[in-house]
Image (cartoon, rainbow, N blue to C red):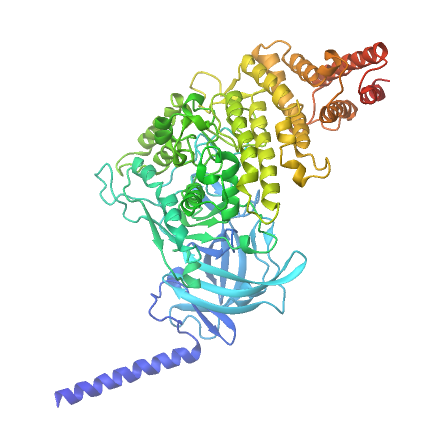
């Protein structure tokens, strides 16, 4: 009897539950995944409309509203809150306060506490179950959301469609096919959107311009050497055993390799990320990184804030992109309140071809594996490892810039012991590429030619991620961080400087191995470049066409130019040492005049005397039928323009007026002109056609500078203007050159290249008449 009564009660209870569920379903109040905890948003699609149920507990709490990127494009995201106003739910974007007294505005220079992104009327019977149901279809399918200043997408009606929604753990992901205008055409792209709650704020680490971390918000650090108030971007790492010097983290930084990554490259991609394990050990964390491998992952998990991916670029497979030379990138999604990285993605866009060819022009004389195409698999894999390691640095919060450049001794570049321990560049984040300074007779093991996570990277991670005891007060924490920063006083390769358009010294260039002797480095590298050209025909012997030969020849010429630019960075250049005011010494230390003179002498011989080995390699006759295009000449002209640029001449002016280098500008201009026109003094021989172009380029440039009217009067608008002092010295150079030309033409009626010299004279006379 008791059993019968119990069964009847159970059946009645079950019937009531089923009836209640049916009633809620008929009203449209049920989640599509009822097992998800109700404390966050949940989605429902009904009659092609997208509804969100907003629990009362969610109101007023910050969360992220995300538009996920495609391919190599990072996500856009807004920090938002939901609020209830009468019978409407408002989606608002508040201003953010990451540091006491500082506000990240909703839009630049806009004083506004919050902005309303959308207003949603409550659906019928909404709120009776502690949730407010709203229809958000138009928000995603029709509204023109400004995700960032200047970036929005106006949907194209007719090809925009809701495709699905998924409730994940404390997260909602929505997929739509969105019609947009791209390149003048209507394109319907699959785009994912998401809502996810923000975690409790973590401990912050303040931005410091002496280190290479990215920041929350948008600190403009390109021309600033002061500490704007803000926080660096970094992952939340907390020791599981707080009393241990080195501990595993409570939650490691986790990355998942996309199934698109070919299996043969996955071990190398993993190794590239795991190179950073030693850097995190320096910060006190063991096994701080976990790299997962999978052969399948749902599109919903791919677009979850809880999944950080290593993506495999597909653009390289498109017709027209076969020769694309695109490396990779990384994107971060951060909590703007603290700088905590919530999700990051690494995008590997490089092709086997681009990685192989970039390595060939630097390492072929030093690595026999690279002397024939295609490269063996283990070599290509190692190149993917290098690429991944660099992009992983961005994933951990570091930016592209100049890390410890101009710090390594040149004599260590062919020292195997040094290279094994320190590498040939202090940081994988530098654009240094492969070490091409050793000579074949040095017998450097090929694995030591590649860049790797170095001492500067370990230093950066140690400063950014070291966890301090909770009982340590903020003043002591700041003192300890400053103590780490002061290591830069004695360790040259710990010094960071921010990349900028103006190359103000040898520690600010790219694409070459930056040692403490740019002239010596260029000499060593150019010997190997000549060897590369000698190896080139045999390396591509089995190619069906000349495509690779053309590309590699172009790349060799470009790399020659990179080295000339590096040498030229000494001219009017400085060694950069960021430091606080309390320390003695200058932030910018001039390169010695002896080194500057040696650099100018080197360029006159190796850059402006036509390098026949580069212009006319033996194979050129097979693929050329004209002097067009003459890339070497174009690079020579670019270099000359750079050597006459106003920013360089203003630096020389400063050396003259404030550092005590008397007549620095006049002597520099005199030496540049004397080197370019040495044929006038040397004899009656013909002037090489390339030299004629350079000489006429020089005159044309100075004449155009003289003829330019004054248009700028504010100090900040004169960066590209020449000072009257420099223009006066340039005029003196032209007057002297006019006299030399006139005298030589009168004295020697049979002067070879007379027509060229006459044109030079007439050009100057158009200005001086």
Along the line of sight, the residue nearer the viewer: 395 or 414: 414
Give the left or right position of residue 597, taking residue 720 as reference.
left
Q: Position of residue 501 (x, y in %)?
A: 59, 32
Q: Is residue 78 left or right of residue 676?
A: left
> Along the horizontal axis of the image, is 513 left or right of 769?
left
Measuring from the top left, give residue 265's x and y in whole percent.
41, 50
* Residue 59 visible in image: no
| Percent position of residue 160, x then y | 58, 67
Q: Residue at the location (43% across, 30% down)?
A: 425
User: How many numbered marks appear?
Assistant: 0
Question: 714 above or below 297?
Answer: above
Q: Which quadrant of the structure image shows residue 249? A: top left
Image quadrant in which the C terminus is located: top right
Left or right for 281, reference 120? left
Q: Quadrant of the N terminus?
A: bottom left
Residue found at the very far left of the displayed protein: 1
Q: Nearer the viewer, residue 686 or 765?
A: 686
Q: Is residue 425 above or below residue 598?
A: below
Res. 255 in view: yes
Q: Residue at x 59, y 42 (%)?
A: 549
Nearest the camera: 443 or 415?
443
Above-or-below relation of 173 to 341: below
């Amino acid at each position: 009897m008791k059993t019968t009564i119990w069964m009847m009660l159970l059946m009645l209870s079950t019937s009531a539950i089923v009836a209640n569920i049916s009633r809620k379903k008929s009203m449209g109040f049920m989640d599509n995944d009822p097992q998800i905890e109700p404390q966050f948003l949940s989605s429902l699609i009904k009659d092609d409309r997208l509804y969100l149920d907003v629990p009362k507990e969610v109101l007023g709490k910050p969360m992220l509203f995300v538009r996920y990127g495609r391919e190599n494009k990072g996500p856009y995201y807004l920090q938002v809150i939901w609020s209830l106003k009468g019978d409407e739910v408002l989606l608002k974007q508040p201003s953010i306060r990451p540091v006491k007294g500082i506000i990240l505005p909703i839009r630049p220079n806009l004083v506004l506490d919050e902005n309303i992104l959308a207003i949603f009327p409550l659906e019928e019977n909404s709120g009776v179950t502690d949730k407010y149901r709203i229809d958000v279809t138009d928000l995603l399918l029709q509204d023109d959301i400004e995700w960032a200043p200047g970036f929005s997408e106006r949907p194209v009606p007719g090809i925009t469609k809701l495709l699905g929604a998924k409730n994940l753990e404390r997260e909602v992901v929505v997929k739509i096919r969105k019609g947009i205008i791209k390149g003048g055409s209507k394109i319907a792209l699959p785009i994912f959107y998401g809502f996810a709650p923000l975690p409790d704020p973590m401990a912050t680490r303040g931005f410091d311009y002496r280190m290479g971390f990215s920041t929350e918000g948008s600190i403009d650090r390109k021309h600033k050497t002061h500490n704007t108030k803000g926080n660096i971007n970094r992952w939340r790492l907390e020791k599981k055993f707080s009393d241990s010097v080195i501990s595993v983290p409570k939650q490691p930084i986790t990355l998942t390799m996309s199934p698109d990554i070919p299996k043969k490259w996955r071990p190398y991609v993993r190794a590239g990320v795991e190179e950073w394990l030693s850097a995190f050990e320096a910060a006190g964390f063991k096994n701080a990184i976990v790299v997962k491998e999978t052969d399948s992952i749902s599109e919903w998990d791919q677009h979850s804030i809880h999944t950080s991916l290593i993506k495999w670029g597909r653009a390289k497979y498109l017709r027209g992109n076969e020769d694309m030379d695109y490396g990779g990138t990384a994107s971060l999604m951060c909590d703007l309140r603290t700088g905590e990285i919530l999700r990051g993605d690494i995008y590997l866009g490089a092709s086997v071809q681009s990685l192989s060819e970039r390595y060939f022009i630097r390492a072929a004389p030093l690595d026999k594996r690279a002397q024939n195409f295609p490269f063996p698999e283990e070599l290509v894999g190692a190149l993917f490892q290098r690429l991944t390691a660099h992009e992983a640095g961005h994933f951990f919060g570091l930016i592209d810039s100049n890390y410890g450049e101009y710090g390594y001794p040149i004599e260590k570049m062919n020292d195997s012991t040094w290279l094994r321990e320190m590498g040939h560049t202090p940081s994988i984040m530098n654009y240094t590429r492969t070490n091409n300074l050793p000579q074949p007779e040095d017998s450097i093991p090929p694995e030591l030619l590649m860049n790797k996570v170095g001492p500067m990277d370990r230093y950066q991670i140690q400063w950014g991620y070291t966890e301090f005891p909770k009982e340590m007060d903020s003043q002591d924490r700041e003192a300890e961080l400053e103590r780490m920063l002061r290591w830069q006083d004695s360790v040259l390769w710990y010094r960071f400087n921010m990349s900028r358009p103006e190359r103000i010294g040898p520690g600010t260039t790219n694409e070459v191995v930056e040692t403490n002797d740019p002239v010596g480095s260029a000499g060593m590298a150019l010997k190997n470049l000549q060897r590369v050209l000698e190896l080139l025909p045999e390396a591509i012997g089995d190619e069906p066409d000349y495509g690779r030969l053309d590309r590699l020849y172009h790349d060799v010429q470009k790399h020659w130019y990179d080295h000339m630019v590096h040498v030229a960075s000494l001219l009017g250049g400085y060694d950069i040492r960021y430091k606080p005011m309390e320390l003695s010494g200058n932030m910018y230390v001039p390169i010695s005049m002896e080194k500057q003179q040696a650099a100018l002498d080197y360029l006159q011989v190796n850059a402006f005397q036509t390098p026949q080995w580069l212009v006319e390699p033996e194979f050129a006759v097979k693929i050329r039928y004209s002097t067009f295009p003459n890339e070497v000449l174009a690079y020579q002209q670019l270099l000359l323009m750079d050597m006459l640029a106003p920013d360089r001449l203003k630096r020389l002016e400063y050396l003259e007026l404030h550092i005590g280098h008397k007549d620095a500008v006049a002597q520099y201009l005199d030496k540049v002109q004397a080197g370019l026109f040495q044929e006038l003094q040397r004899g009656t021989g013909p002037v090489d056609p390339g030299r004629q172009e350079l000489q006429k380029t020089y005159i044309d440039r100075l004449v155009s500078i003289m003829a330019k009217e004054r248009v700028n009067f504010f100090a900040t608008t004169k960066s590209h203007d020449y000072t009257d002092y420099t223009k006066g010295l340039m005029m003196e150079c032209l007057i002297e050159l006019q006299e030399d030309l006139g005298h030589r033409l009168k004295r020697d009626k049979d002067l070879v290249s007379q027509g060229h010299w006459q044109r030079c004279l007439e050009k100057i006379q158009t200005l001086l008449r």
